[in-house]
Amino acid sequence: MAKLDTKQKILNTAEQLFAELGFNDTSLRHITGAAGVNLAAVNYHFGSKKDLIKAVVNRYLSQFMPQADAALSQLLTEPSLTLPQVFECFVKPLLSLSSVRRQGPEIFLQLLGRGYIDNQGFLRWFIVNHYGPVLGHFSQAIQKAAPQLSKAEVFWRLHFTLGTVVFTMASSEALRDIAKNDFNEEIDVEGLVRRLIPYLACGVGAAPLSDRKVSDRKESNIKLSNS
């Protein structure tokens, strides 16, 4: 029991510091000092800082990914689908993370965002190698819902999507306070997530830049021919 308590204390402390300060700016010394444990305990339970980072993130991924995959796999059996339906697959899995930690959905997305901001290539490698099939199903669903997008375009759209979601969830308390004070609107985390879906779907499904350039040139040529 003592070992389990120490391991959980390290995980909880590391998670909080990683989310607040980032992976690069949080040292093992920060974590051991805040958790009240020694470095030997971290080495014993996790082995290294990289392994501790993976353990912190995987505490959420191991619950989130199977649920998301089940929803995506079911959706892919449909003859046609839409982008809002694709993003809807992530709502329940995300909200279920409240059972891991009280603010689990927000913390999870902050950690994912930190993985990109701090350029943690090993973390992306870990996610791809452990949850590649889930990511593959997500990619298939996006391409089925928006076949006009190239793979490169999908990459950029999903990168911007992650940034939007991370920022929104990181500032969720402030946004909910503003909604209450300015618009007398009570909104919980689920309501916030569902407000995001139409915005994300429109952004991901927008016409590719190359198509808009062609459209703009055609419109310009029509105006010149009529002048």
Image (tube, grey):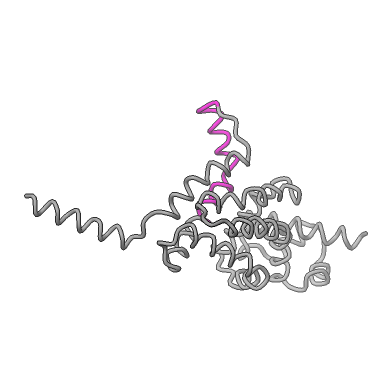
Between residue 190 and residue 206, name the one nearer to us.
206
Residue shown at 50% from the left, 52% from the top = 82
Quadrant for residue 86, please give it: bottom right
* Magenta run includes residue 49: no
Q: From the viewer's perspective, is 210 left or right of 13? A: left
Q: Is 178 inside the magenta-drawn segment?
A: yes
- Quadrant location, the N terminus: bottom right
Q: Nearer the viewer, residue 192 or 173?
A: 192
Query: Viewed as shown, does residue 80 lie left or right of 5?
Result: left
Q: Say which residue appears at 51% left-offset and 55% top-offset.
A: 80
Secondary structure mostly seen in magenta is helix
Q: Give the range drawn in magenta.
A: 162-184
Which residue is pictured at 54% across the width and 47% down the height? 168
Q: Position of residue 110 (x, y in %)?
A: 61, 54
In the image, residue 27 sits, relative to residue 227, either above or below, namely below
Residue 188 position in % (x across, y down): 63, 37
